[in-house]
Amino acid sequence: MEFGYRRPKSIARAISGLFTVLVVSGCGLNGPAHKPAAPSVAAVIDLGFMSYSPDNITICPGDTVEWRNTSLITHTVTDDTRRAKKQGDASLPSGAQAFDSGDIPAGQIYLHTFTIPGTYHYFCTYHANHGMVGTIIVKPAS
């Protein structure tokens, strides 16, 4: 009986084995699996490899949004015009406070409650130049 490293017969078989290990362990190609959102969450946005999904949502004042980092890399959710490298990546309605999640590692979440109606444009500080931007519209209470 021989122990130790054994070279796979093919690259495809090695990749297939790695894929099986990731899926069975709760990680897919998009990162760790998550629990369902809390009942108080109005919307869930996934932080993919270089995008928010969905990248545009409409909610009501007082609603909480949950961002889930489903990728294998760190992201942020930032709406602060002072930190935006490109004009338009960040904007806030009058009276709203800037916000920044800080680093959100793979498998982690960030929650933010929106109280002021208007349009919020936010971005990932690491990947905005790759198009990782999103929009939240908080419609006025009727």
Image (cartoon, grey):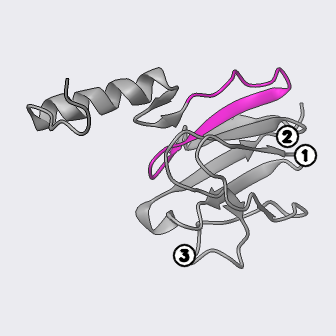
Q: Residue at x 70, y 74 (%)?
A: 81
- Answer whether residue 44 is magenta in the image: yes
Residue 93 versus residue 42 in the image, above or below: below
Above or below, 103 relative to 25: below
Q: Which residue is mark 1?
A: 115
Residue 140 numbered tag:
2
Image position, residue 107 (x, y; %):
62, 40
Residues under labels 1 and 3: Cα distance? 26 Å
Label 3, label 2: how many angstroms apart (C-alpha)? Answer: 28 Å
Q: Position of residue 12 (x, y in %)?
A: 14, 32
- x then y, percent, for residue 1: 20, 23
Query: Which of the pair 13/101 is nearer the observer?
Result: 13
* Element on which disc 1 rests: loop
Q: How far apart are labels 2 and 1 at the CA level? A: 10 Å
- Residue at image point 58% right, 46% down: 106
Question: Which of pointers 3 and 2 indicates the residue nearer the eye?
Answer: 3
Given the current orientation, which residue lies at the most extreme front position?
1
The kind of residue tagged 3 is Lys
Task: Write down the region rendered in magenta.
Answer: 33-52
Quadrant assignment, res 102: bottom right
Looking at the image, which residue is at 55% across and 37% down? 54
Toward which corner of the image does residue 80 lie, by quadrant? bottom right
Left or right: 16, with 10 as reference point = right
Q: Amino acid at mark 2?
A: Pro
Mark before the other along the chain sequence, 1 or 3 = 3
CB-based contact (under 8 Å), mark 2 and mark 1: no
